[in-house]
Amino acid sequence: MARTSTWCPQPDDDPADACPISPVVDLVFSRWTTPILWVLHEHGTQRFVELERRIGVTPKVLTQRLRQMERDGLVRREIYAEVPPRVEYEITELGRSLQTVFAALGDWSGEHMADVERARAGYAGPLPR
């Protein structure tokens, strides 16, 4: 029997469709997306090296993630025809619209992380490798 909920509607027969929000979770909560969006939201338009310094990510990974986020419409890249060339990144309105999602997660974290820590402390099972 299929379960339904407001955040994960009833799945079809295909296991890949078990939770339609999975692509959104992959998009928004991949390893570097959240820190990049946070920096762009809090500090405004940033050059590549500023993002790299603030986040502490390798240039290769930052380049890959920014390209994906630009493709997905979360950030905008502006290239200035100067010598040397200047490239700046800014959060788009689509990226900014995730602020309510992050705020809700922040609220949840404030309310429940102590419970999570207690559960972790009382867990006697094997830890993942």
Image: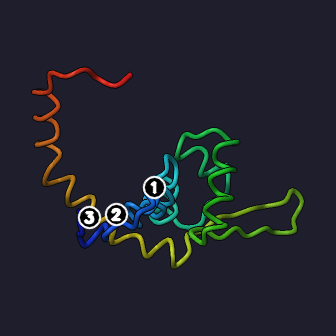
Q: Give how far apart the Cα atoms at labels 3 and 1 are.
A: 32 Å
> What residue does disc 3 label?
2
Residue 60 occupies which quadrant of the picture? top right
> What residue does disc 2 label?
102
Question: What residue appears at the point 23 percent right and 64 percent down from the top-left corner?
Answer: 3
Compare residues 32 and 40 and report the one nearer the observer: 32
Q: Nearer the viewer, mark 3 or mark 1?
A: 3
Compare residues 76 and 15 and report the one nearer the observer: 15
Question: What residue appears at the point 34 percent right and 25 percent down from the top-left corner?
Answer: 128
Which element is circle 1 on? helix
How packed is label 2: few (under 14 Cα within 10 Å), some, or many (20 or more)?
some
- Quarter of the image that includes the C terminus: top left
Q: Give how far apart the Cα atoms at labels 1 and 2 are.
A: 9 Å
> Residue 114's spot in the image, x, y percent?
12, 42
> Residue 117's spot in the image, x, y percent?
16, 36
Question: At label 1, which amino acid type do we have?
Answer: Thr
Which element is circle 2 on? helix
How packed is label 1: few (under 14 Cα within 10 Å), some, or many (20 or more)?
some
> How does the figure colour the protein chain or chains?
rainbow
Question: At label 2, which amino acid type do we have?
Answer: Phe
> Closer to the N terminus: mark 3 or mark 1?
3
Proximity of marks 1 and 2: CB atoms separated by less than 8 Å:
yes
> Residue 53's spot in the image, x, y percent?
58, 44
- Number of the label disc, if any, that sits on residue 34: 1
Residue 106 occupies which quadrant of the picture? bottom left
How packed is label 3: few (under 14 Cα within 10 Å), some, or many (20 or more)?
few
Is residue 55 shown left or right of residue 105? right
